[in-house]
Image (tube, helix red, strand yellow):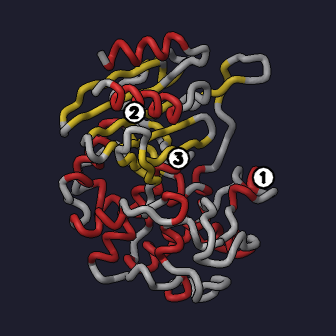
């Protein structure tokens, strides 16, 4: 039934979908299918092992990495940015929890007028921190919710300061390798990655063209990872089985703060009063969605390499179907 519903929904849409969908219930995969092509020039289809840029779904990994340091007592949520980056403006007022929940007030680099120009250029984590420091604050730390890529970049740098490892190496050691996630990593434009999808969008005449360029070093711990639906299922299992974090801190991660955002997750109640935790991502024609219906123990993961039909639209439709079929 779910398969026929998804196919009917996609067939009724004018926008083309290119990507992968996987739905699981009670730990069992109930739907898994690939659509479109990973490369339209070479006519290479998307498959279950196709790698996609996942954009802001990266923030889930960054939050988990921070919380592992909390569990190891190398960090506390009330620690301030000044403890790790002494030169940061208002650093003694901004806590780790503020960064995790987008309440730090730090200016978002992706909102800055020079972002497009700078996004073409190679940036080190320190370059990104200096850029963030130059941005005006949007609000007083702790007072308002303002979604901020900058805050999660600062978290990435703090992970490096505490661990002595690069952000990518820390994720490899603490998340990827323990969960056997062999097809996930920090993207770099110059790196050759087998089975990685190309990105596509439509031009002004509605013709397919390549995604606009971004130097992926600009995205870092806020949006720089690539992954597959199968690897994200492994992450999902690791979260549910408490392989990465204890039950107590996992519950904290899914506790709603200002404007329904926990530690790396949006948290809402659906019309059917189920708890939905999720994150969407979008980066230069790639979109991604990772959603969990907590009470039903269902997970929906949708990844795409084309900016026509957004994964958030498709994933939300699947959630509605799953809730209404009861």
Mark drawn on residue 55: 3
Residue 227, can we see it?
A: yes
Q: Residue at x 37, y 81 (%)?
A: 75
Q: Residues within 10 Å of mark 1 (few under 14, many from 20)?
A: few
- Calculate the distance from the C-alpha at mark 1 to the C-alpha at mark 3: 19 Å
Mark 3 touching mark 2, by CB under 8 A?
Answer: no
Q: Between residues 175 and 325, which one lies in front from this camera angle?
A: 325
- What's the mark number on residue 243? none
Residue 156 showing in the rendered view: no
Q: Position of residue 22 (x, y in %)?
A: 33, 30
Q: Nearer the viewer, mark 1 or mark 3?
A: 3
Quadrant that contains the C terminus? top left
Q: Residues within 10 Å of mark 2 (few under 14, many from 20)?
A: some
Percent x, y for residue 278? 43, 47
How would you rate the neighbour count of disc 3 (Cα within 10 Å): few for under 14, some for 14-19, many for 20 or more? Answer: many
- Residue 214 in percent (x, y) is at 65, 46
Labelled disc at residue 117 = 1
Image-quadrant location for residue 182: top left
Q: Nearer the viewer, residue 320 or 104?
A: 320
Label 2, on which residue? 319
Q: Are marks 2 and 1 in contact (CB under 8 Å)?
A: no
Q: Secondary structure at mark 2?
A: helix
């Amino acid at each position: 039934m779910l398969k026929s519903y998804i196919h009917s929904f996609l067939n009724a849409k004018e926008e083309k979908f290119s990507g992968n969908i996987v739905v699981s219930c009670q730990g069992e995969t109930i739907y898994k299918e690939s659509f479109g092509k990973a490369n339209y020039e070479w006519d290479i289809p998307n498959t279950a092992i196709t790698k996609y840029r996942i954009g802001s779904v990266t923030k889930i990994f960054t939050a988990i990495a921070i919380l592992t340091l909390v569990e190891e007592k190398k960090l506390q949520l009330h620690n301030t940015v000044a403890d790790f980056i002494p030169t940061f403006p208002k650093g003694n007022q901004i806590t780790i929890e503020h960064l995790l929940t987008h309440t730090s007030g730090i200016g978002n680099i992706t909102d800055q007028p020079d972002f497009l120009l700078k996004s073409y250029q190679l940036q080190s984590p320190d370059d990104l921190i200096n850029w963030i420091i130059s941005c005006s604050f949007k609000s007083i730390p702790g007072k308002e919710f303002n979604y901020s890529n900058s805050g999660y970049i600062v978290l990435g740098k703090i992970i490096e300061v505490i661990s002595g490892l690069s952000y990518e190496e820390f994720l490899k050691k603490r998340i990827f390798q323990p969960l056997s996630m062999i097809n996930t990593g920090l993207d770099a434009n110059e790196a050759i990655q087998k089975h990685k999808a190309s990105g596509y969008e439509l031009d002004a005449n509605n013709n397919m063209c390549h995604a606009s360029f971004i130097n992926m070093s600009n995205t870092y711990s806020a949006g720089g990872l690539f992954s597959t639906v199968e690897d994200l299922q492994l992450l999902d299992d690791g979260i549910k089985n408490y392989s990465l974090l204890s039950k107590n801190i996992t519950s904290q991660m899914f506790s709603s703060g200002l404007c329904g955002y926990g530690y790396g997750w949006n948290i809402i109640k659906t019309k059917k009063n189920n708890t939905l935790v999720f994150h969407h991502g979008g980066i230069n024609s790639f979109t991604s969605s990772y959603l969990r219906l907590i009470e039903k123990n269902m997970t929906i993961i949708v990844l795409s390499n084309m900016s026509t039909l957004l994964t958030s639209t498709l994933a939300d439709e699947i959630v509605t179907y799953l809730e209404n079929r009861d």
